[in-house]
Image: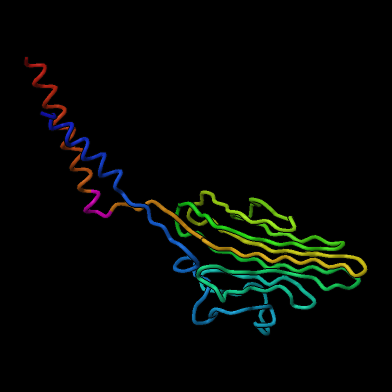
Amino acid sequence: MRPASLNHTAAFAAALLALPLAAHAAFDGDFAITDVTTPAGIYTLDSFAGATGAVTFAQWSVTFGPSLDGTSYLDTTLAPQSITFGTGTPSQEGFFESKISLIVEVPCDGFVSFNFETENASKDGLASFAVYLSGELQYILTDAHKQGGSGFQVSAGDTLEFRSATLSSGTNSFATNVTTISDFVFTVSVIPEPATAGLLLGLAAMGLTGRRRRSAEQAAV
């Protein structure tokens, strides 16, 4: 017969392994990017007459950077499954730049992952898609076309930023970037409910008691 202490220990281990992971998928909940004020649609700086600085899109803070022809934009028509954003500069002589930045605060410790597809084109200019975590650059892509996935650990209070930027200088110069983010997932370990925590502590205590009793019996033999 299997000793009671081993049964209790096995039950305790099984209970620990059974603790679930909370997965938050897509651009909703704590990462929602659409609401009543900013419903699904296509937005540029011109969409917010008189606005200065960042614009609130549900949980996200979006900054439309300088752009002579208003080509920094955010498309949330497919949210919450995916979002598309981009920037561009006019094809004419001179120095031009455009940028759009999307920032959200991470609610708790966890792991964030997403897929991306980005396209860059330029003549005498630079176009890029970049990801920042709490202001620190994680990576920047300037490839003509790049598709893949990314993921990293995050902590409560961190800020996650997606940024599209373009600049150009010269005769008939231009630069454009278009980026789509999809399959956005945030995963965090669930803190056990009080009842669950009590059960785990009870199982641990039972296992410890069984072990001590068994040791005492062996010593008395």
Residue 21, compared with residue 208, is above or below; it is: below
Tell me the quarter of the image containing the N terminus.
Answer: top left
Q: What percent of the width, then of the height, locates residue 201?
A: 22, 43
Image coords of residue 71 (percent x, y): 74, 75
Q: Quadrant of residue 134?
A: bottom right
* Left or right for 3, reference 53: left
Q: In the shown orientation, is residue 9 left or right of residue 43? A: left
x%, y% of residue 154?
A: 51, 51
Residue extending farthest to the bottom is 49
Q: Is residue 114 above or below residue 102?
A: above
- Magenta residues? 193-197
Q: Is residue 200 left or right of residue 33?
A: left
Instruction: Judge by depth and name the residue closer to the eye, 198 or 131.
Output: 131
152 over 209 or under it: above or below: below
Looking at this rendering, what residue extends furthest in the top direction?
Answer: 221
Image quadrant occupied by the C terminus: top left
Name the image quarter holding residue 132. Answer: bottom right
In the image, farthest residue toward the right? 171
Location of residue 15 (image quadrant): top left
| Count of picture labels | 0
Task: Pick whichever, 181 or 49, lies toward us.
Answer: 181
- Residue found at x 38% / y 51%: 189
For the residue pair 147 and 3, the one nearer the viewer reads as: 147
- Residue 65: in magenta span: no
Rendered view: 135 above or below 26? above
Residue 169 image point, x, y percent: 88, 65
Q: Residue at x 51, y 69 (%)?
A: 59
Q: What kind of secondary structure does the magenta stretch mostly adopt?
A: helix
Q: Residue at x 11, y 27 (%)?
A: 213
